[in-house]
Amino acid sequence: MFRNEEDEASDYDEGDETFESHNFKPSYVVVAIDTHHSMFKRNKENKLHFRSCLEACLALADSLILKTNTRSWRPFSIVLSGQQTALIGFHNNILDTIKLLKAKLQLSDDALTKEFQSKGELDLAAFFLVCKKLFHDIKTTFYKRSLIYITNNDNPVNKKAAKFTALNEAKTFSGSEIEFQVIPTENNFNYKIFYNELLSLLGGPRIEEICLDTEGLTLKLSSSVGITQNQRRMKFYPFLNDQSRYLKCVKLDVVSQVGRLINVMMTKDGKKVMNMTEVSEESPEFFIKSHAEGVDHVRFDLAEKNMLQHSSIPIGITMMYVSKRLVDIGHVFTKPYLLKEDPSEELPFFNKFWQGCVDMDRVLICIVNSRELGKIRYSELIPVLVDDSPMFLVKSLPYANEISYPVESEYPEYIPDEEKRKVVEGLVDKLTFDFNISMVPDAVMEKKKAYIKAKLLDEPTENVDGPVTCDKDTLDEHLKDVVRDIKNKFVLSGEKKRKAPAPRGPSKKKQK
């Protein structure tokens, strides 16, 4: 009934190897931009619609430059209507893509219009065929195909024969599993003339979506380019003193770090430098620090360290017992992660453990051994529901010497105050809104990113230390009333007390 670990070690290996879940398809997007004369009119930002499209593509490419997943470097292609080849292909380097888009955006409006505006009538069927052929360059057999056509021309075909050919070519999108979307950038776009009929042939929902500015286009493209998520297989041992039986699970990291900020040594093509290490003939030395005064550290050589770290605990998660929560909400000691059931798991025990914890308001206390000779930590598995899927939130438990408490301070006796309570409720209400992290960016992190991008793109780094812009005005306007009430009702610890004004006139000490 249960799998034996030795029998299935070959087809369910655990360790640092990552894999891609087949419940999520990596997304490849063809961004098709119309070069009709309507795209070279000005929008509400006083920009050419065509320029806004290029700026949105540049923002998308710029957001992908620091992604560690190699698939994220070629997720989209750019093709202009009437062209037989793509302006940016899937196999183009992301650094070259950014340089090309920046060069085109430096052109004046007249130069952009002269270079890119189409001179004749568009053969829409041939253009659809060019877009479809771009997906043939992808060697991956398992991926999602999306075609986003940005246009303001609601009547691209005037002749019946051309319309018939274009609709027949569009019908092949469904057979090729291509998701087609048309995105206009002005309000007076009329879907009824042509595109309603085209979308109805594809069989999908007819969604009329309009992006009126650069920000809207950027959000649309960013949401369409799905970034694959690295996952790690983990074995869950829930049976007491029995390591031959386990459940297949998957570890999902919910907090990621920009890897390219750690390894700043990059080659010109944007790939990581291979770090070459030399094995020293001298045996490394390890020690345990002693905090007692006058007592030496305990020292070990490599063999002693490996012998002490060797454990009979298997690599994975071993359940110890069921308990109430030991770590309060909001207390995070190490980076938490999610644990879900592997899609290939056939036994129902994962869901039963999860449901039992929910019904009894309990958590699973487990020992986590991430790798061979790695650190062993106690963790609690908290049942959570993510996208309607049962998962466990894994939070590490600190050891006694890792716990530190804040310095105790004497606080005045609490006196209930209805006005203060209402002010705090108002603060909570005001803070409950659609917050964007760009409103208050991390200045240090933004400067690091700007420096690395400048080095990758061979740009000057003199302006990297400049001020980081943030949308303080929006927050200040949103919170100014409730902040004023807070200052009036509470004595804030960070505020300096006002001193009484010094008396004017001669000092009384000098007066006799």
Image: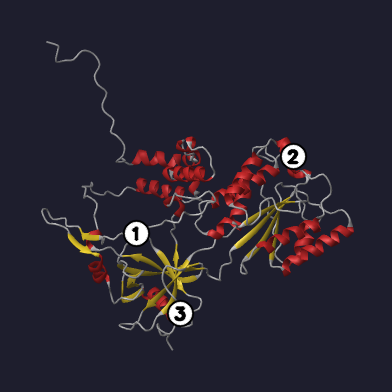
Closer to us: 76 or 47: 76
Q: Quadrant of residue 302?
A: bottom left
Q: Quadrant of the N terminus?
A: bottom left
Above or below 452: residue 72: below
**Percent coordinates x, y for residue 487 in the rendering:** 36, 39
Q: Quadrant of residue 498?
A: top left
The residue mark sitting in front, 1 or 3, is 3
The tag earlier along the polypeptide, 1 or 2, is 2
The tag earlier along the polypeptide, 3 or 2, is 3
* Total numbered labels: 3
Residue at numbered disc 3: 10
User: Label 3's element?
Assistant: loop
The residue mark sitting in front, 3 or 2, is 3
Image-based side of 221 in relation to 451, left or right: right
In contact (CB < 8 Å): disc 1 and disc 3:
no
**Residue at 14% in and 12% down:** 510
**Percent coordinates x, y for residue 248 in the rendering:** 44, 77
Which amino acid does the dot numbered 2 rest on?
Thr
Q: Quadrant of residue 13?
A: bottom left
Residue at numbered disc 1: 332
**Residue at 76% in and 39% down:** 114
Is there any visible trace of residue 213 in the rendered image?
no
Which amino acid does the dot numbered 3 rest on?
Ser
Here the colouring is: secondary structure
**Percent coordinates x, y for residue 429 in the rendering:** 45, 50
Image-based side of 81 in relation to 14, left or right: right
Q: Quadrant of the C terminus?
A: top left
